[in-house]
Image: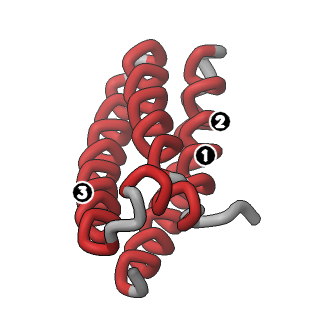
């Protein structure tokens, strides 16, 4: 299982500012929750290109601050969507939700 949050990377991004760390992760959790809703709607609409774009955007946001597990899952969704495999993308939604919940828990310990 991948690291939920690479705190060393997050510290590098925030120059070790604990308040900024909490703010960034809080925004990421909120943003990712919205991206998951958009992804779900995109899957329901059967649009693999939009699905790939949403996953790509979410992957980048997660990777930039060290939310590795989510970034890896979004990468998988992006790749599967690019191949037109929306069923595989849909099958990833429960894991994405679980990893988002784990990230939320990490926020509590920052």
Q: Nearer the viewer, mark 3 or mark 2?
A: 3
> In this figure, which colouring scheme has been used for the structure?
secondary structure
Place of residue 88 in the rendered image (x, y in percent of width and height, measured from the top left)? 64, 36
Place of residue 4 in the rendered image (x, y in percent of width and height, measured from the top left)? 58, 66
Discs 3, 2 touching: Cβ within 8 Å: no
Tell me the element at label 2: helix
Measure the alpha-carbon separation of dots 3 and 1. 19 Å
Tell me the element at label 3: helix
**Residue 94 falls left or right of residue 36:** right
Q: How busy is the neighbourhood of tag 1: few (under 14 within 10 Å), some, or many (20 plus)?
A: many
- Establish if 96 lies above or below 83: below
Place of residue 109 in the rendered image (x, y in percent of width and height, measured from the top left)? 42, 86
Tell me the element at label 1: helix
Q: Residue furthest bottom?
A: 109
Mark number displayed over residue 27:
3
- Establish if 101 lies above or below 42: below
Discs 2, 1 touching: Cβ within 8 Å: yes
**Residue 43 falls left or right of residue 38:** right
Question: Can you say which quadrant of the picture contains the N terminus?
Answer: bottom right
Measure the alpha-carbon separation of dots 3 and 2. 23 Å
Question: Can you say which quadrant of the picture contains the C terminus?
Answer: bottom left
Task: Give the mark, 3 or 1, whose residue is nearer the N terminus.
Answer: 3
Residue that label 2 marks: 76
């Amino acid at each position: 299982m991948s690291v939920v949050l690479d705190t060393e990377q997050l510290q590098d991004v925030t120059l070790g500012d604990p308040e900024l760390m909490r703010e960034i992760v809080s925004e990421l959790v909120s943003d990712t929750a919205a991206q998951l809703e958009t992804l779900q709607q995109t899957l329901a609409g059967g649009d693999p290109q939009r699905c790939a774009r949403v996953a790509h955007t979410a992957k980048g946001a997660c990777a930039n601050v060290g939310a590795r597990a989510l970034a890896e899952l979004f990468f998988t969704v992006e790749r599967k969507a690019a191949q037109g495999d929306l069923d595989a993308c849909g099958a990833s939604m429960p894991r994405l939700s679980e990893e988002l919940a784990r990230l939320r828990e990490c926020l509590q310990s920052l």
